[in-house]
Image (cartoon, rainbow, N blue to C red):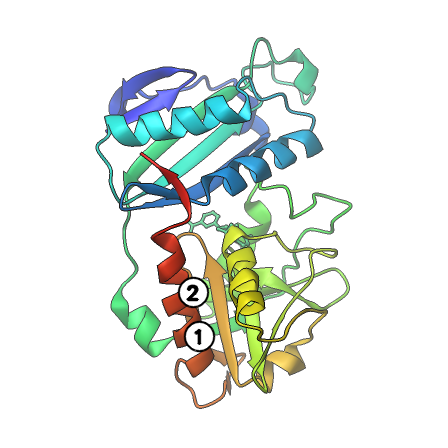
Amino acid sequence: MKVYINGKFYEKKQAKISVFDHGLLYGDGIFEGIRSYNRLVFKLKEHIERLFESAQSIVLTIPLNKQQMIEAVIKTLKINKIDNGYVRLIVTRGEGDLGLNPYKCEGNASVIIITDKIALYPDKLYKSGLKLITVPTIRNHPEALNPQVKSLNYLNNILAKIEAINAGFQEAIMLDALGYIAECSGDNIFLVKDNQLYTPPQCMGTLRGITRDIVLEIVRDLKIPAHEHVLTRHELYIADEVFLTGTAAELVPVVSVDGRTIGKGKPGKMLSMLRQEFRKRTRIEGIRY
Ligand code: PXG
């Protein structure tokens, strides 16, 4: 496996960055998780766009422009001969001293691209569905660290994940600072009620997921009503269907929330239809290599 670091390729064992990099010292940096399907980097432009928005928000200058970044991702996939894979794109603040001040980081931000064959989730997950629990740790307040910034500082989500696992569940539902549903530790959340789709808005604490956007696009095309609306746990409990969306896991059914069985307790019809539509789009949308 060859890893891209600042324009050069290194074997996995040699792919290293400084212990003084503020990405390590402070989680000062940003990232994207991207997928390629059959030599098509799915929604690559959208991921690069979001990366640059995260950078703008944290005053980080990316040493490549958007086109160069796209080319770097494609080059890394090609060198590694990966047709179907996962791309982890990371931009750190770079090497600095042992103080917070990012302006003391010398030189450029570091750009790292790791690609790997995709570790597909077990089929069982999509057949039996997930059981979720709401955890005490809330999503970052948007005026603390806005969840729209896909930052290297993921402790907020990691704490939520720990709480879910310790309670015997696979995934956590995180609330926002007002007590409304935000998202899960690495996925957005949707519910279906009376053939309409609902998902929390961005304003209080959810990442604008690329997969979330695709689902909203699909339902718009199919003229299924969809709402970006504040949701409480109650709305999840009484939903006909609940599912999660994310680049890695795609669309995943949820069959129980906080011990309440959702709908019939098995993956629903809307999700199955959406997954088919999603699959179609993974074959046509993105950048070919
Ligand atoms: N919410 C959060 C908090 C995320 O981190 C999503 C939603 C889904 O967004 P996309 O754009 O992927 O539809 C994410 C992104 C992993 C992993 O290993 C996943 C994410 C982040 C870090 C690791 O599964 N998901």
In the image, is the residue at mark 2 within 8 Å of ligand 1 by its beta carbon? no
Which element type, helix, strand or loop, lies under badge 2? strand
Crowding around mark 1 (Cα neighbors within 10 Å: few <14, some 14 to 19, many 20+) is many
Q: Which residue is mark 2?
A: 251
Q: Which residue is mark 1?
A: 271
Q: Nearer the viewer, residue 49 or 262?
A: 49
Q: Is residue 91 above or below residue 95?
A: below
Percent x, y for residue 35?
37, 45
Residue at left 46%, top 40%?
Answer: 44
Q: Is residue 244 above or below residue 29?
A: below
- The kind of residue on which mark 2 rests is Leu
Q: Nearer the viewer, residue 288 or 151?
A: 288
Residue contact between numbered discs 2 and 1, judged by CB atoms under 8 Å: yes
Percent x, y for residue 49?
57, 37
Residue 203 left/right relative to 185: right
Residue 73: give its label.
none
Quarter holding the N terminus? top left
Which element type, helix, strand or loop, lies under badge 1? helix
Q: Is residue 209 above or below residue 29?
A: below
Residue furthest out toward the top = 107
- The kind of residue on which mark 1 rests is Leu
Is tag 2's residue or tag 1's residue first in the polypeptide sequence? 2
Q: Is residue 129 visible?
A: yes
Crowding around mark 2 (Cα neighbors within 10 Å: few <14, some 14 to 19, many 20+) is many
Q: Quadrant of residue 74?
A: top left
Residue 224 left/right relative to 169: right
| CA–CA distance in space, label 2 to label 1 | 8 Å
Q: Is residue 134 visible?
A: no
Percent x, y for residue 161?
49, 58
Q: Quadrant of residue 194?
A: bottom right
